[in-house]
Image (tube, grey):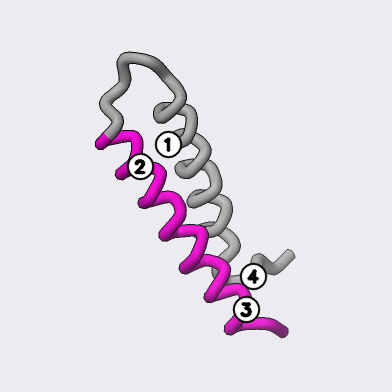
Amino acid sequence: MTMREGLIPTVLGTAVSTAGYMLKQKRGSNKMVANTIFGFGLAHVVLGVIDLVEHRS
């Protein structure tokens, strides 16, 4: 079984973005940290999707 290049960063970014979004919704959490985590996850999603599109087979 082969795994397409860019799939791992995309899945990881989705999980991190979800965690950041959940932190944004939680009362009492640091909003700057939540936004940073959310943005970090979105960056991974974008970079992973770029890899997936570039390396189509």
Q: Decide: marks 4, 2 in contact (CB < 8 A)?
A: no
Tag of residue 53:
3
Residue under label 4 = 4
Identity of the amino acid at label 4? Arg
Q: Decide: marks 2, 1 in contact (CB < 8 A)?
A: yes
Q: Which residues are magenta?
A: 32-57
Number of other residues with Cα within 10 Å of mark 3, as a class: few under 14, some 14 to 19, many 20 or more: few
Identity of the amino acid at label 1? Gly
Q: Decide: marks 3, 2 in contact (CB < 8 A)?
A: no
Identity of the amino acid at label 2? Ile
Q: Within the image, what quadrant is residue 10 found in?
A: bottom right
Front position among marks 4 and 1 = 1
Above or below, 1 relative to 42: below
Front position among marks 3 and 1 = 1
Task: Give the CA separation, mark 3 to mark 4.
Answer: 10 Å
Above or below, 41 relative to 34: below
Number of other residues with Cα within 10 Å of mark 4, as a class: few under 14, some 14 to 19, many 20 or more: few
Task: Give the CA separation, mark 4 to mark 1.
Answer: 26 Å
Residue under label 2 = 37
Task: Give the CA separation, mark 4 to mark 2.
Answer: 25 Å
Residue under label 1 = 20
Q: Position of residue 32 (x, y in %)?
A: 25, 36
Q: What is the secondary structure assignment of the residue under circle 3? A: helix
Q: Which of 51/4 is in front? A: 51
